[in-house]
Amino acid sequence: MTTIRTDRRRILLINGHPDPHPDRLCSALATAYGEGAEAAGHTVRRIEVGGLSLAPITSQAAFMSAPDPEVAEIQAAVREADHLVMIYPLWLGAPPAVFKAFLEQVFRYGLALAAPGEAKGVKGLLGGRSARVVVTMGMPGFIFRLVFFAHGLKCVSRGLLWISGVRPVREMALGPAESPSPAQRLRWIARMRRLGAAAI
Ligand SMILES: Cc1cc2nc3c(=O)[nH]c(=O)nc-3n(C[C@H](O)[C@H](O)[C@H](O)COP(=O)(O)O)c2cc1C
């Protein structure tokens, strides 16, 4: 059973699917999470990565430079949030390129990690926040974990969020998700609504 939190949380809900169409499972999962959270009194801001057009970072200098206003505004939303939810499909074993470009643009030095020279070793800047990472995929979730070591999930949950100080980072691998039975889809959506209500 999911425990409902009594404190109100500021949730940043990121649909990382390049196609933001509401029929996509990722969009439906994000909607369910957001509805559950808002019904329980939490504040939700949603970002549709598929509605943006952010180019990948192409140099260390660009990664260390100040972001443009559109990205700076998203960074402000990350700073304001106390819980991050990222939902994306597995494409070729990894996050889709459009979502990866979004992560490179937003989570650059100064937001997620202190820039080299500004701290000793690796210093995460996103402490005090929790996160949930949800990945949908064509294969069964257990194959993804057993055979592929959940690589396309860990690169975000550990390679980005955990190293940036986010705790806890909860993970979900949902599959097979290309054409799930209506009952399975409803179960996943109901679960996301419950997790949203609990803001975890
Ligand atoms: C370009 C592309 C690459 C994909 N690569 C993988 C993959 O490597 N492994 C996998 O299990 N599923 C893969 N899939 C299936 C998607 O993960 C699946 O269709 C998606 O998670 C379903 O969610 P959606 O309805 O939100 O798109 C791929 C799909 C596309 C379109």
Image: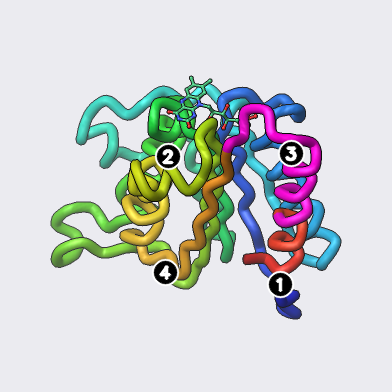
**Foreground residue, 99 or 73?**
99
Separation (CA) of disc 2 from disc 1: 30 Å
Q: Nearer the viewer, mark 3 or mark 4?
A: 3
State the residue position of label 3.
Answer: 28
The alpha-carbon separation of the residues under discs 1 and 4 comes to: 24 Å
- Residue placed at 50% from the left, 35% from the top? 139
Label 3 CB, ligand 1: below 8 Å? yes
N-terminal of the pair, mark 2 or mark 4, is 2
Q: Is residue 199 left or right of residue 41?
A: left
Residue at 81% of width from left, 67% of height from top? 41
* Residue nearest the observer in this picture, 198 or 188: 188
Magenta-colored span? 176-191
Sequence-first disc among 1 and 4: 1
Are dots 2 and 4 in contact, CB under 8 Å?
no
Depth-wise, is mark 2 or mark 1 nearer the camera? 1
Neighbour class for label 3 at 10 Å: few (<14), some, many (≥20)? Answer: many
Residue at 70% x, 44% y: name it.
29
Q: Judging from the image, what secondary structure is the residue with disc 1 in?
A: loop
Rendered position, 160 above or below 180: below
In this orientation, which residue lies closer to the viewer: 127 or 168? 168
Q: Which residue is mark 4?
A: 127
Location of residue 62 in the rendering, given as x and y in whole percent from the top left corner = 27, 32
Which residue has dot 1 on it? 2
